[in-house]
Image: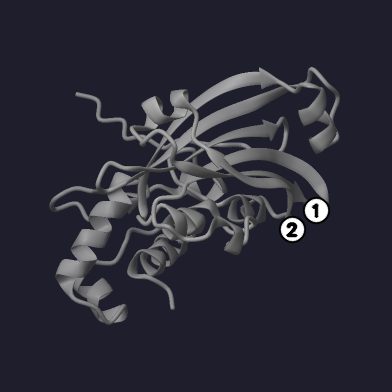
Amino acid sequence: MSTLDERLREVWADAARRGATMPSEPALAESLATSRPAVREALVRLEERGYIHRRKGAGTTVNPSLLDIPARFDRRLEAAELIAAMGHTPTVDVLEAATSPITMDEAQAHALAPGTLVLRVTKVWSADGVPVLLARDAVPVITGADPDAVDPAEPMVDLAQTLAGERVEWEVVWPGAAALDDADAAAVRRPAGEPVLALDVTGVARSGAVCYWTSELHVRGTFRYAMVRRADWR
């Protein structure tokens, strides 16, 4: 079943395609069979994400430019969703999955106890059979669950909930540039030395605990990321 946010995005998309404004809060509450406070909160979230702009007495205008943005840098998408949003069929190959103790550098960086076990998974994601993303995921084993009993191909957020015991609420993303070394080039079937987009990502729970960290290498020419921000000129 679709969430209220998802249904409101469908209303937004329809309005954006027609060049119309969003319906009023009472009309949305009636058409979506929900309360006005729930609609109001969901509209706040839509505005924060750049879909709409609300001004008292002037209605709610929509941002039609988002119709052409399949992937947003400021919004978390699993790799499969990201590839599908680009119009391709996603597949994943797990190259390696093993458990090892956390390193001292990792323990200090993520405020985890020395000796904590970490499930480390290396995956290659493909779009229509062509490798486009290499990910090295690390999930600390906090709950006592058996890391050998999980499917390493599962989305990392699900692995984190099973092994780290908390739901990730935020990600801290550090973008950069890198060049493929021989091993990574072979994994994604690209020439060694080719430039790629590198992302270092940390998943953080509401409690502040780190539930995973990952390093991703994105092959050039596959994804076009966008970030939407308000232009509040004064």
Label ID, residue 89: 2
Q: Position of residue 220 (x, y in %)?
A: 72, 30
Vertical relation: 55 (above or below) 222: below
Q: Position of residue 7 (x, y in %)?
A: 39, 69
- Disc 1 residue type (three-letter): Asp
- Disc 2 residue type (three-letter): Thr
Q: Is the C-beta separation of discs 2 and 1 under 8 Å? A: yes
Q: Which residue is mark 1?
A: 128
Residue drawn at x 50%, y 29% as measured from the top left: 103
Q: How many residues crowd around disc 1 within 10 Å: few (fewer than 14), some, or many (20 or more)?
A: some
Along the viewing direction, whichever of 132 and 113 lies nearer the viewer? 113
| Quarter that holds the N terminus | bottom left
Residue drawn at x 86%, y 24% as measured from the top left: 191
Residue drawn at x 59%, y 64% as measured from the top left: 149
Along the viewing direction, whichever of 72 and 191 lies nearer the viewer? 191
| Quarter that holds the C terminus | top left
Q: Position of residue 216 (x, y in %)?
A: 61, 35
C-alpha gap between disc 2 and disc 1:
5 Å
Along the viewing direction, whichever of 95 and 21 lies nearer the viewer? 95
Q: Position of residue 26 (x, y in %)?
A: 19, 73
Q: How many residues crowd around disc 2 within 10 Å: few (fewer than 14), some, or many (20 or more)?
A: some
Colouring? one colour
Along the viewing direction, whichever of 109 and 22 lies nearer the viewer? 109
Residue drawn at x 31%, y 35% as measured from the top left: 230
